[in-house]
């Protein structure tokens, strides 16, 4: 997802120190598959009735599936998560005004069940200029998007060995 660090008003924590990383990433942590499943398990353990109670291992995938089937607890958790993501993306759109936002990560494997409510909320809540120019899509790289992104960054930042540079220059000038 997007990694934006925004300190609270005043630029630091209540003790004047910089805020911790945990305090800076509530949306991403809240929307993680691990957190979605944990919130469902906590609710079940506290006695909330749910069809998820019969699932041996509650995962975000199970929460999404049970939300589609209409389970009230799963619907509540899913809708809260999508609203939080949509709100966060509206802020990203307003601040950075990107033409394209690509969502990736394990939870996005549910496809339109995530994309449609998140995109709708983000575009509804973003200011006009950002809303009118942005598109929000799911990655087409599947679960390999992290690896592919890291490879691109490494390729762009690492110096080329001298032999490869010389070979590339010879090819460009027609030498062998």
Image (tube, rainbow, N blue to C red):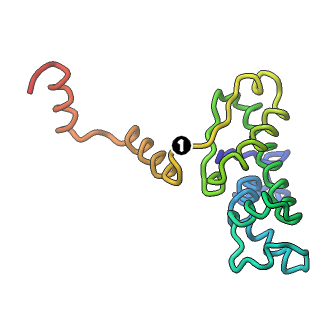
Question: Which residue is more in the foreground, 162 or 26?
Answer: 26
Query: Eyeballing the image, is 71 above or below 89?
Result: below
Q: Residues within 10 Å of mark 1 (few under 14, many from 20)?
A: few
- The residue depicted at 48 percent of the width and 45 percent of the height is 149
- Residue 128 to residue 55: above or below: above
**Count of labels in the image:** 1
The residue where tag 1 is placed is 140
Q: Quadrant of residue 133?
A: top right
Residue 39 versus residue 115 in the image, above or below: below
Please, what secondary structure does the residue beneath circle 1 have?
Answer: loop
Q: Is residue 63 above or below residue 12?
A: below
Q: Position of residue 102 (x, y in %)?
A: 61, 39
Residue 18 visible in this rendered orientation of the protein: no
From the top left corner, tell me how far across and down residue 148 is, in percent.
45, 47
Q: Residue furthest front?
A: 69
Q: Is residue 81 left or right of residue 165?
A: right
- Does any portion of residue 15 appear in the rendered image? yes
Q: Nearer the viewer, residue 118 or 22?
A: 118
For this orientation, the residue located farthest to the left is 176
């Amino acid at each position: 997802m997007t990694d934006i660090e925004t300190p609270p008003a005043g630029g630091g924590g209540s003790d004047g120190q910089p805020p911790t990383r945990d305090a800076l990433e509530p949306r991403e942590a809240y929307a993680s598959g691990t957190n979605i499943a944990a919130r469902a398990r906590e609710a079940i353990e506290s006695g909330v009735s749910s069809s998820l109670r019969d699932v041996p291992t509650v995962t975000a995938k199970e929460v999404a599936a049970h939300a589609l089937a209409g389970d009230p607890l799963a619907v509540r958790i899913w809708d809260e998560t999508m609203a939080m993501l949509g709100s966060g993306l509206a802020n990203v759109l307003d601040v950075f005004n990107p033409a394209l936002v690509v969502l990736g990560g394990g939870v996005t494997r549910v496809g339109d069940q995530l994309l449609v409510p998140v995109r709708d909320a983000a575009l509804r809540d973003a200011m006009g200029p950002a809303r009118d120019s942005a598109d929000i899509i799911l990655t087409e790289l599947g679960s390999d998007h992290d690896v592919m992104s890291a490879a691109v960054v490494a390729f762009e930042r690492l110096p080329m060995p001298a032999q490869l540079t010389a070979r590339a220059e010879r090819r460009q000038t027609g030498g062998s």
